[in-house]
Amino acid sequence: MTETSKKRKRRGSASSKGEPSTSIGRSKRDERKSSDGDAGESHFAAAADEGKIDFAGPSKRDRGTSEWETPPHEDAVMNGPDDVEDGRFEHGELVERISIILSQKSNTDACTVEYLVDFLNSTVGQENVTEVSMTKEDVATLLLPWSVAKLMNAAGRKSSDKDAESFGVIKLAWSGLADSLDNLAPLGNDTGAPPLVEDLLFTSLSQSTLNKIVPYALSVSFGTEPGIDAKGVSEEASRCYRHLVNRYHPSFDVACSALLAKLDELVAEKTDESRCKSRVLLPHHYSAVESTLQLMNQLMPSANPKKLFGSVVALIPSLGRLMQTVLNGCGLQDDASMIEYKKNIETLIRSILWGGMFHPDHHIDGFRAMEELHSMPSLANLSLMNDVDRIPTKPTKSCFQQGLFKFLSKVYAHESSGDARATTVLLSVVTRGYFEQVKKSSQKSVSVEFVAHLQYRFWSHLMLPALEVMFRLIRSPETQELLLAILRAVDETLSNVLEFDVYLPSYSDPDEAHLKLLTCITDGLIDATSGEGCGDKERAVLSSLNTALQLNHRLVHGRLAGVIYLGCACLSNQPSVANTLLLNIAKTYRELRQTLHFLNACRTTFQSSEGCSSILSCGNVVEMLAMAYQTCPPGQLKEIWEFFDGWVVQVVSKGDQDASLIELSFVVRMFILFAKNIRTSKYNSAELRFLTENSMVMSMSQLIGNARTDDSETSRDRVAFASLGFDLCGWLVDLHARCCFWIDGESAFRTSVMSQGVNGSASLNIVDYLRNVAKSVTSNGFEQWKNRALASYWSKTLEPLQASIPEKLESSILRLSVHRIQQLHSLIYYLSLEDDPSGDELVNEARTLVDFVMYVSFVRFYAARRNGSSDSKASTDMFSALSQSTSVWTKYSDETYAKMFLTWFFVSLSDGCGSEQTKEGTLAMILSMDASFYDNGQLMSVFVETGLQVALSHFVDSVEDLDEASKLRVMLVGGNHKLDQLRQYTATTKANINIVSSRKGYSSAMAILRYLSSAPIEFSLGEEISDNLGVLRVLDLIVSRSVQCAEDRRLHVEMLCASKTLMFALMSKLVPRISSYETTSIAQDLLRNCVDFCSHGELLVSTSKVLSEYLSVCIDYYERDDSLLTSLVNHLEGFLRDDVLDLTARLVVAQSTVRKLNTLRRSSDQGHSKKMPVDSKCAALVLLIYEHLWKHAYGSISGNDSNVCQSILLVSDILAFVASCSSGDEDSTEISPTLKAQLVVDGKGVYKHMLNHFLLVREANFADAHDYLIASLAESPHFLFLIAGSKEAVHHVLNALNRSHTLGRDVPLLDAALASLIRLSDANLLRMILDFVVNDESKLYQRGFVVKVFHLLIACANSQDLHPIIRDKCATLVLTTVGLLRDEGASPSDVLLFSKTVITLISKKELFLLSGRDIAMICCEMNRLFSETENADPLVFKSCCGVMSSLIAHYPKQLYGCPSPLFSFMMAIKCHLLLIGTKQGLTQKCLEYTKLCELLIPHKEVFKKYVVGLILKYISFLNSGMSPITKSKLIPSIYALLDMCTEFETRQINSMIDVPSRALFAPVFQSYKKYYQYHGQA
C-alpha cells in the first residue's frame, strides 16, 4: 500500500505540472492522529493539485432501476467512524476499499463504480474540504482500465450470454469510460494530455482494442445492440464514441468499410418505419454521424491517391443517404445545437467529396484528364417520344472522371433501389465542387470560355444518367420520389451553371450542342408537370424554368405560353417561386423589346384553359409590364394596339359567355394598363390619337354598342361587357386628351374621342349617352335632394332619386365621367386662353357631370354604411377615382360637394385607424399623406368643420342613453350648430351623460380629433373658427362631466387631450366676438378643467397651453377691445388667489402664462417694434403671479417637495420676464426699482437652494428644470450676475455642462446659456471661461466637454478684441480636439463634435491659422476611424468628409505640401466603401465621397499623380467581385477621378492592370468618355 501511494503521488505531481491547476486545494492534516485513519491516509497523503474534490456523498443522479439498490458493502462504505456527523467518507479507508473492489472480477462492485462515476460529475465547493482530497484524475485512472475491460468483454460476447446484471455493468462501463476520458483527455484541448496520462491511454486504448470497441460504441449509440435499452446508455456510448474516434487511426478504406458502411446501415435502420417504432434522430445520433465524418475527413490526406478517387465515388450513395436522412429526414424540432450539427455534417460531406474527387494535388491529375473528353453526350435518350428501350451511349474518349460517370450509370440502371435517390441528393454538391476547383486551378493564360466549356461537359456527362431516368419516370406514375429528387437536382445544378457562368449565349457552340441539351431539359421539365395541383414537384420545375430563362430565353421562348400558364396555376400554392418566374419573364421580354410575344403567349393560354388572368394579381409583374409599355419603341405601339383591338373583338364574338367574360376582363385590364402607361410625345401623338378614335369604332362598338338593361341572361352578360367597355373608354379618353396636348391646331382640342360612331355614324355617341345619363339623374328634384343631402345623411334618412342606370354600370360610368371631366378641364383651359365663349358650354357640362358623380358616389357610400358594410367595392371604386382627381373636379363643385367628399374621407379614415383595416380606410390614409391634398382650397375651407361633424357623429353614437343621444345629435350634428341651445342644455343638465368609451364610435371620434390637430393645414381667419371652437368646447364639457362617473378614465382623458390640442391649433386664428357664448366664458371653462384634472399631467399642460394661446389672442386684439384681456385677467386673478385650489394646477397655469408673455415680449423686441401698449397689463399680471405664488414656489424649492420642478420653471419665467424688463430702456416703469431689488434678493435665495439640490438630486426632471432656469437667466447676463455673481454664474454653467456631458445628456439649453454668456462677455469673463477648461484640473474633465466649450468659444466670440485671448490657447485646444478621436470607443457624437469644432476653426483663419503639421495630424487621426471596422456610422463618414472638404476649400496650398495624408484618407474611405458592400448608408456615403472627389478637380495639376492609386484600388476590387449596387454608386466618383487624369496617368493605369481587369474597367472608362468627359463643345 505504501508503494502504491508513492506511485500515485508521483503520477499526481506529474499531472499537476501538465496543466494549470483548476482544483480545490486540500487542507493540512490536523496534528491529532487516529488509529483508523493514519494508516489509510499515509498511503494517499499527497494528492495532485489538479481536479481535487473530496468525497461529499453521492450526487443525485438518475441511476435508473437496477437490482443492486442496497448492496452488501454499502453500509461498510457509508458508515465510517467520521461519517455520522458530516456524511463524508474517511479518505484512507475509501481508497483501500476502491482498490480492493476494482481488483475483483465479479459484478458486485457496481454500486461503488456508480458512486465513482457520480464523483467524476460532482462539483463540491472548496468550503467543504477539510481532509486530504483525492483528484478526479486519480479516480479516472482507476475507472478507465475497468471500463475498457468490461466493454471489451461485452463486445466479444453474444447478446444471449448477457444477463440483466451484465447489462447494468455495461451501462456503468460506458458512463465510466466517458467520464474518465472527459477528465483525462477532454475534447477540444489543444495542449494534449500529460505524459503519464498519455501512457495510460495508449496502453488501455491500443489500436487493436479500438478496432473492436469503436464499431461496438457506434452500434450502442444508435441503440441497435440487443438488450441495451436502459435509459442513457446510447448517450453515454455516443460520448465515448467521440473520444475513441479521436484516438482511432485506421486506414481510409478500413474507416469506410468498418464505420461508414455501418453508420449508413444504422441510420437507415433508425429511420425505417417498418424496423423502428421511433423514427427520430436525437442529438447524440447527430454527434456520432459528425464524429465519423470528421474521422474520414482527417484520414483523407494520408490515403492512397491512386485509390482515393474510386473509394470516394463508391461512397456517394452512403453519403447521399446521410445527407438525405440527417439533413432532411426525421428529427426533433431544430434548435441552435441541431442546426449547428446539420451545418457541420453538410460541410464535412462536401469536404470529403471535393477532397477525394477533385483535389488538384493528386499525382494522376484528374482535371487534366477531363480535357480529353471533347464530345457532348448523346441526347437520343432525352425524349418523351422514344421507346422504353434506351440507346446505349459511349464517349469517344475516356477520362479520369469516366469512373464517376460509369458509376452513376450503374447506379441509375437500378432506379428502384435506394442508391439512385441517395446519389441524386449529392449531384449538386459534386457539380459545385468541380466548378469551384476548376475556377481556382485554371491558369490566367487559359480563356474563360475554355474553362466554361470544360465545366459544361462535366456537368452534362454527370447529369446524363439522371436525366435519362427523369424522362422515363415522367411517363410513369411510379417512383415519384426519385423523380422529385432528380427535379430538385436539376434545379440546383442549373443554378450552379448560372452562378459560375458555365453557359452563356455568347460562347461558341458548334452545332448548338450545348443549347440542345438545355432545350431537352427544359422541355422535359415542362412536361413533368401534371397540371393537377402545385406541390414540391411543381416548385422544383418552376425554379428550374426560372434559371433556364436567365441562362437563355430561347429555352422557353417556343413554349412560353405553357410556362406562363404553369406559373399562374401555381400562384396560389407556390406564390414566391411562381411570382419570381413570371416577373423574370416580363422583365426579360421587356429588355428584349418583345412585349408583343409575351402578350401572344398570354392569349394562347386562354385557348385550352382558364388562361393567365391571375397574373394581374402580382403587383411587381404589373409594374414590370407598365415599365415595358413606357419604354416600348414607338414603332411597336401600333402593332400592340391592334393586337388588343383584335383580341377584344374576337372574345366578344365567342359563343361561351362565361368563358368570354373571364378572358374579356383580362384583356380589357391589360388594354387599360397599356393605355395608362404609354408615354405621349410630339412624335407619336397623332398616331395614338388616331388609334384611340379607331378603337371607338372597333372595340367600343362591340362592348357598348348593343347593351340592354332588362333582366335576361343575355342582358346581364351585355351589361358586364358594357361595364368593361366604359372602363376602357375612360382611359382612352385620358390618352386622347394627352395626345391633344402635343398636337398643334385648334381642332385638336375640339375633337372628342367619345363622339365617334360606327363607320362614321352616330350610333355610338358615348358623349350624348353620358350627358343623357347625367341629366336624367340631375333634372327632377335634384337641387332639393342636394340641399337636404348632408342633413339627411346625419339623420340617417337619405333617400336616392329615381335613376335609370343599371347598378352594375354605375362604377364604370362614374369612372368614365371623371375622365370626361378631366378632358373637359383641358378643353376649357385652352379655350380660356383664346377667349372663346364656347367654353361656357363645356363648363356647364363639367358641372353636370360633377353633380352626377357626387350623387352616385355619395348615395352608394350611404347605402353601404346603412347596410353595415364599411368596405363596399362599389363605393371604394368610385371614391378611388375621385381621390385621384380632386384638383380637377373640385373646380366645378361647390361647398356641399366638398363636404360630401370630406365626409367620406373622415369616416373612412376613422375606420382605417382601427384594428380592422379596410380598403376605403387605406385609400383615405394614402390621401391623407398626399401633400397636394392640403393645397386644395375648396376642400380645406370646410376641412375642420366637416371633420368635427364626423367626429361628433361618432361621439354621439357612444352615448348610452338614447334620448340624450338624440338631443345631442339634433344640436351637434348636421351643421348650423345651435350654440345657444347647447349652452342652455349643458347648463340645465344636472345628471352626467354616460358615455361608453369601449364603443367603436368613441375611438373613431378620438382618432379624427387627433388627426385634425396634427394635419398640415393652414387655418384662415374667419368666424367659422369661432363656431368650431364652440362645438369643441361643448364636446369637451360633455366628456369632462362623463369622466366623473366613468370606471376607466384613461380613454376620456385621451379624448380631452385630443380636443385641447385641436383647440390650441384653432385658437391662434380666432376672431373674438364678445357677444358669443363660446369666447366670453372660455377662460372660466379652461380654468375649471385645470382644477378638475390636476392629477393628469398631460391634460393639465394641454389645457394651460390653450389658455396661454387665448391670452395671446386677447393681447393681439387689445387695441380693438380691451374687455377680452380684462375679463381674462380677472379670471386668472381669481384662480391664482384661491389657495383652496390645487397648487400644482395653479403653478402650471401661472408658468404657462408667464412663458407666453416672455415669448410675446421677446418677439416684440426682435422685431424692433414699439413698446406694446399692453406691457403694463402684462407686467401687472406677472407681478400678480409673483405676489400670490412666489412664496409657494419658494417653499417647494427649499423643501424639495413634489412640485419642485414646476416651481423652478415658474420662477425661471418670472425672473426672465423681470430681466427682459431690466435690459430695456432705462426709463421703463413697468417694474419699480424697489420691486426689482426685491426680486434680485428672492432670486438669490432660489438660486442658492437650487444649487444645493443640484449637487444632491440626480433626477432627470430636476436637471431639466435647473437647465431651464440657467438658460432663462443667461439671456440677460447682467441680471444673472446680480443674482449669482459673474464668476460663480460662469462656473455654475460650466459645471452643469460638464455634468450633463458626463451623464451622456445633450442639453441645448446649457449650450445656449454658455453661448449667450460668451456673446456678451468681456475680456475678464472670457479668460475665466478659458482658465476653467485649460488648467491643471482640466485633466479631470472629459475631452468632449472641453471640446464643446472650445467650439462655443470660437463660434460665439465674434468680437475682434477677444480673439487674441482665445488665440493663445488655440494650439492646446486643437490637440485636445484631435485627441477626441484617439479615445477608445469614440462615439459618433464625439466625431460629430470634432467635425463641427474643426470646421468652425478652419473657417476662422483670423483666429487661428493651421500649419501643415496640424493638417497632417487631423488627416491621420481620421484615418484610424476607417482602418479597423467596416461598419462605420454614416454620421462618422459624413463628419470626416466635411472636415476634409473644408480643408480643401480653405487650405489648398498647405495640402499641396502634404498630399500624402490627404490621399491616405481618401484611400481609407475608398476601401471602406468597397468593403461594406450594400450595407446601410452606402448611398449617403458614396454621395459624400463623390463631393470630395469633385472638390479635387480644380487642383488636378497638383494631385493628378496621386489619383492613380485610388483608381487602381477600385479596379482591384472590381476584378475580385463587386456588387452592382456598389459599382453604380461609386461610378460618379470614379468619373471625377478620371477627369483629373491626363493621357500620361491613363497610360500608367493601363500598364499596371492585367488583361481581365482591363476588360472589366474598359466599359467604365468608355462611359466616362461618353457621358462625363468635356470635349470642348458648348
Image: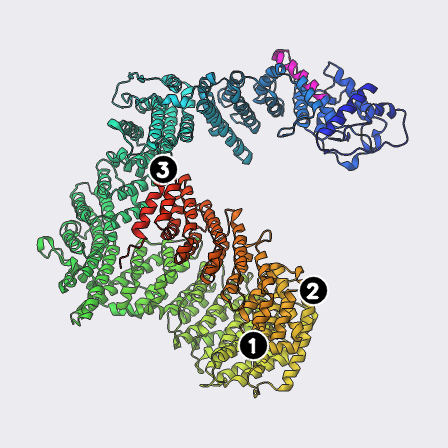
**Where, by quadrant of the figure, is residue 477 drawn?**
top left
Horizontal side of 271 relative to 621 (left or right) equals right
Work out whether 150 lies above or below 1383: above
Q: Mark 1 points at which residue?
A: 1154
Q: In which quarter of the image is residue 149?
A: top right
| Rendered position, 164 above or below 1435 | above
- Can you say whether 1255 is above or below 645 in the image? below
Query: Main SS of the magenta segment?
Result: helix
Question: Could you tell me which secondary element the residue under label 3 belongs to?
Answer: helix
**Among the two numbered marks 2 and 3 on one chain, the one whose residue lies closer to the N terminus:** 2
Expressed as whole percent of the image width and height from the top left, the position of residue 89 reads 80, 28
**x, y (%) of residue 1390?**
56, 57
* Kind of residue at badge 3: Val
Q: Which colour scheme is used?
A: rainbow
Q: Which residue is drawn at 30% across and 39% down?
A: 568
Q: Which amino acid does label 1 sit on?
A: Val
- Answer whether residue 1557 is visible to the viewer in this image: yes
How crowded is the residue under tag 3: few (<14 C-alpha within 10 Å), some, or many (20+)? few
Q: Can residue 868 be seen in this view?
A: no
Magenta extent: 142-165
Q: What residue does disc 3 label?
A: 1555
Is 154 magenta? The answer is: yes
Q: Which of marks 2 and 3 is in front?
A: 3
Q: Name the residue under label 2.
A: 1256
In the rendered view, tell whether residue 569 sits above or below residue 417. Answer: below
Point 29% across, 70% down: residue: 894
Distance from disc 2 to disc 1, alpha carbons, whole Å, reads 29 Å
- Residue 199 on the magenta segment: no
**Mark 1 crowd level (few <14, some 14–19, many ≥20, 10 Å Cα):** many
Q: What element carries label 1?
A: helix
What SS does tag 2 mark?
helix
